[in-house]
Amino acid sequence: MESNGTEFNGKRPKLAVEEQVSDTDMSNLVENEQCETIIKGSEEMESNIACLLEKIESFTQLVSELLESGKTAFKDLSNEFEERIIAIHKDHVEKWQDEIKELRLIDSSNEEASTILCNARNLLQNGQIQF
């Protein structure tokens, strides 16, 4: 296929390798300079950042102290709770043991009364009462 003196071979012209490398190096250099400017920042920004870092450290210390005091408070509360539960248990057990003793005394007394009444019935039935 021929056309008026120009040939089209279907390929794009390529840039020379040196041109591509130099363009890439230039764009990287520009980006690095911008990053350095951003990273360095102004003295005011550095001061603000330092202030924020101090606030973070202070807040972290406060949280740590709160956690420790909370742990101590819960430990104390837990110990007090345990002591109170044990005391309540002890009081109830002693009360129930006293009730058991009372029931045994009542049962013993009832057995004595029952024996006396049974003997009296036997004596009345047999007519062996002597006046």
Image (cartoon, rainbow, N blue to C red):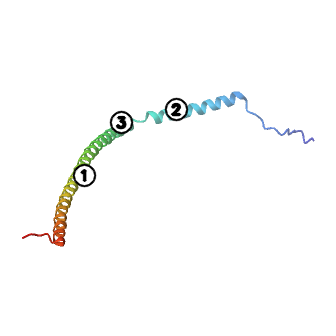
Mark 1 lies on residue: 89
Dot placed on the residue nearer the N-terminal end, 3 or 2? 2
Q: Quadrant of the N terminus?
A: top right
Q: Nearer the viewer, residue 28 or 127?
A: 127
Type of amino acid under label 2: Glu
Q: Quadrant of residue 72?
A: top left
Question: Crowding at label 3, few (<14), some or many (≥20) Cα neighbours within 10 Å?
Answer: few
Mark 3 lies on residue: 50
Note whether 42 is above or below 98 in the view shown: above
Question: Crowding at label 2, few (<14), some or many (≥20) Cα neighbours within 10 Å?
Answer: few
Q: Quadrant of the C terminus?
A: bottom left
Please report the residue visible at 21 percent of the width from the left and 54 percent of the height from the top: 97
Q: Residue 62's spot in the image, x, y percent?
A: 30, 41
Q: Residue 50's spot in the image, x, y percent?
A: 36, 36
64 on left or right of 127: right
Frontmost of labels 3 and 2 is 3
Question: Crowding at label 1, few (<14), some or many (≥20) Cα neighbours within 10 Å?
Answer: few
Mark 2 lies on residue: 33
Q: Residue 36's spot in the image, x, y percent?
A: 49, 32
Q: Secondary structure at mark 3?
A: helix
13 on left or right of 82: right
